[in-house]
Amino acid sequence: MAILNSMKLIGSLTSPYVRKVRIVFLEKKVDVDLELENVWAADTKIALNNPLGKVPCLLLEDGEAIYDSRVIAEYVDTLSPLGKLIPTNSRERASVKTWETLADGILDAGILARLEATLRPTEQQSPMWVDRQMGKIDAALAQMASQLGQNAWCHGNQMTLADIAVGCALGYLLFRFPSIQWQTKYSNLDTLYQKLMQRTSFIETAPPVA
Ligand code: GSF
């Protein structure tokens, strides 16, 4: 195990999972060095730290690798008492983590649909598979909008990891699936998104314009 001076986050500027944990670091005011890694490059070294070959991957001060984004977010929330992002009460904790799973599910489905179109030759692509993934995105958006209702935040009366995960999922859709018109269909999600986008943590981690 290599000894590092400070924590190192391995990731990319376009990954929404990486964005989620970078926002958590910024909101918690915990320092971390970002090390850019293209996991799709033939010579990627990501598997040396995460055998699953995925980012984000956090290297702790003693070199231990922590993944995936949900584990990293949960860990970083414990590192400073500032603005708790995951409630300690077990029932509330489960609710916030379910919001996170719902938001991450949009990313999982979106990425699977996109890889089908970008990585597979046309004759091997399955429109049925893509439709299945797009159906998950539609259902998750509807659930988020109905659960949020007219509340200011996804859970309770302050920003939590639920809002961060939802904001990253909505931002990802704008970035990769601009044809999904979630802002017009769900004005309450748009209000939440606009509010999140005022925060330095969201502004600083916005995906680069291609
Ligand atoms: C998902 C990470 C992931 O798929 C998490 O961290 O929450 N459940 C995990 N990361 C992508 C990058 S991206 O598309 O955001 C990744 O590293 N993919 C490489 C691969 O081989 O799947």
Image (spheres, rainbow, N blue to C red):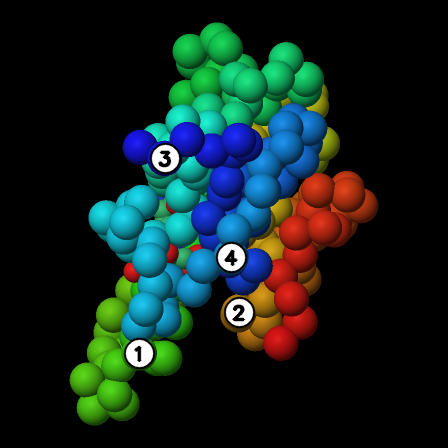
Question: How far is disc 1 from disc 2 in space, using C-alphas?
Answer: 15 Å
Q: Are marks 1 and 4 in contact (CB under 8 Å)?
A: no
Helix, strand or loop status at disc 4? strand
- Of marks 3 and 1, which one's residue comes earlier in the chain? 3
Q: Position of residue 62 (x, y in %)?
A: 40, 27
- Of marks 3 and 2, which one's residue comes earlier in the chain? 3
Question: How far is disc 4 from disc 3 in space, using C-alphas?
Answer: 18 Å
Q: Position of residue 121 (x, y in %)?
A: 25, 88
Compared with 191, 96 (above or below) is: above
Q: Mark 3 or mark 1, which is nearer to you?
A: 3
Q: Position of residue 126 (x, y in %)?
A: 23, 78
Residue type beneath disc 2: Arg
- Of marks 2 and 4, which one's residue comes earlier in the chain? 4
Q: Nearer the viewer, residue 200 or 147?
A: 200
Is disc 4 surrounded by few (<14), some (14 to 19) or many (20+) residues within 10 Å?
few
Which residue appears at 67% of the width and 35% of the height?
26
Residue highlighted by disc 2: 176
Label ID, residue 36: 4
Judge from the rendering whether residue 152 lies leftward or rightward of residue 210; answer left or right: right
Residue highlighted by disc 1: 119
Residue type beneath disc 4: Leu
Which residue appears at 53% of the width and 69% of the height?
176
